Image (spheres, rainbow, N blue to C red):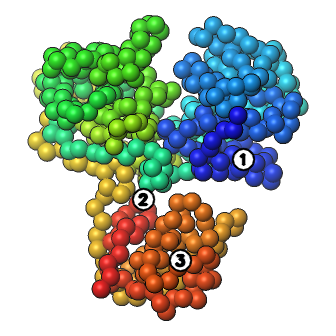
Amino acid sequence: MTLSLRPYQRAAIDALYEYFAGSTGNPLVVIPTAGGKSVVLAGFIREAITAYADTRVLVLTHVKELIQQNFMAMLRAWPEAPAGIYSAGLSRRDIGAQILFAGIQSIHRHAMRVQRCDLVLIDEAHLLGRNDSGMYRSFLQQLNEINAGLVKVVGFTATPYRLDSGMLHEGKDRLFTDIAYHVPVLEMIQQGYLCPVVPKQTETQLDVGGVGTRGGEFIAKDLEAAVDRDEVTRAAVAEIVQHGEGRGSWLIFCSGVAHARHVRDAIREHGVSCETVTGETPGPERAGILAAFKAGRLRCVTNANVLTTGFDAPGTDLIALLRPTKSVGLYVQMVGRGTRLAEGKEDCLVLDFAGNTARHGPIDTVDGRKKEKSEEPGEAPIKICPECQTINHASVRHCIECDYEFPPPVVKVAPQAASNALLSTQIQAEWCDVTGVSYARHEKPGKPASLRVTYECGLARHSEWVCFEHTGFPREKAVSWWRRRASHLPAPATVDEALGNLSTLRRPIAIQVRPTGQYTEIAAARFV
């Protein structure tokens, strides 16, 4: 059976071959949520065993749903695969399988039983902390000792960073050393492999100004106390129901277990079928709820901290964020639940009541690097008791001197909450008059040459790269670029051919420029 790979999936596997041909580290493969990491895993494993028949592969992750998904993807790609599962949650312990899909919680004490292993693939690698001395690291250390240090480790993730330690492959004591391959989420959306996510302005907005922070994230109990307010919940739910008309599957991220249940109850009051999934939900009940949601028999699911990874419901076409977070990874993972393609689905509407898009920016330009702490200490969060004027820490509920009970944090309902872009392409572009254009050959090691086009717009300069010698989507864009400038000539096959025909090109009088992170993208051009 031939495994059909998308171009970027093929490129990811090839990048691993190229990496191991010249490096000895532990690389990362970064593919956005819904990009088919399980297919890449399956393809890489099958090719590795085809090339070296006795290769032993271990695929590790943290939740049984992902173990099952990856195992089934392997069998679809290779029905005769010598694969097994080691997971207490799935009641299987196929310890001798050549390809073993395992839960880290179940297998971390059994490196001696695993014995020989050549390749360890870690799915959702962002859940493994750089300084973590727990299950993953101790297990991998034992496995390396058994196998004379020859085990190769590859991490797969959509978000190669953690809130507490920044990029996974940077810094001291990191497990992963490099990013071997990365395909941007915006590129996959533009090529039609992922569904667009679109923002909608909301009137209700959560105010977390009085909520404390610990370990770089909002303190969970304080966050839920601030957010779980009946008047705010009802206002947000009314908007969800209004915008959800005509959309089939709603997924709502909440700030705690009680909050998720209260949002569920408010949704039901509008006559919409809704259930809740949390870490407390029994396994069979959870499986039944999610099966009904995926099948379209259940319109809405609220959840607290459980459906951010390992959850695949392609039909989800509305996501509501009632969970403020300082974690870039969590924000991207939540929005990413809506990017899967499904029949009849044109896009996924994202209602961000939590201010996450304003906090982090578009999902294709987020910065996962660890923020350096200021050398000057900031002011401690405090509040003054109105009865005795004693200074209290902002987190206390009662005055430390007179026991005055402070009112709970106030959550504001803003009359006009900001509508923030989920993708950089949704940021409004500006037109700039072009005063000059220059062209040059651009070389990048290991890649085909491209044509660098630099536009002078007064004192500013903006560049774009036209990839005539590439294949697939970049080549298609290059052909389209050429046709707008020299429709009477066929698109060149090489950069040198393009440089030889510059005199025939029309020069734009203006370009439309859109910021994308620290750079700019040329979105359009205007000609005479």
Query: Is residue 188 at least partly visible in the picture?
Result: yes
In the rendered structure, find residue 16 and report the number of the disc placed on it.
Answer: 1
| Disc 1 residue type (three-letter) | Leu
In the rendered structure, find residue 46 and report the number of the disc placed on it.
Answer: none
Within 10 Å of the Cα at label 1, are there few (<14), some (14-19), or many (20+) other Cα atoms? some
Q: Please indicate whether residue 15 sits to the left or right of residue 241 in the image.
A: right
The residue under the point 27% across, 49% down is 420
> Dot 1 lies on which element?
helix
| Disc 2 residue type (three-letter) | Gly
> Dot 2 lies on which element?
loop
Closest to the observer, 510 or 377: 510
Quarter of the picture containing the N terminus is top right
In the displayed structure, 21 sits above or below 101; it is below
> Dot 3 lies on which element?
loop
Which residue in the protein does label 2 denote? 517
- Residue 441 picture location, percent across and down: 60, 80
Closest to the observer, 18 or 342: 342
Q: Indicate which label's residue lies in the foreground, 3 or 1.
A: 3
Task: Tell me the quarter of the picture where residue 64 sits.
Answer: top right
Task: Tell me the quarter of the picture where residue 89 sits.
Answer: top right
Which residue in the protein does label 3 denote? 491
| Disc 3 residue type (three-letter) | Ala
The residue under the point 55% across, 66% down is 475
Q: Indicate which label's residue lies in the foreground, 3 or 2.
A: 3
The residue under the point 43% across, 25% down is 307
Q: Indicate which label's residue lies in the foreground, 2 or 1.
A: 1
Q: Give whichever of discs 2 and 1 has the lower sequence position.
A: 1
- Residue 26 picture location, percent across and down: 72, 42
Structural distance between the alpha carbons of marks 2 and 1: 27 Å
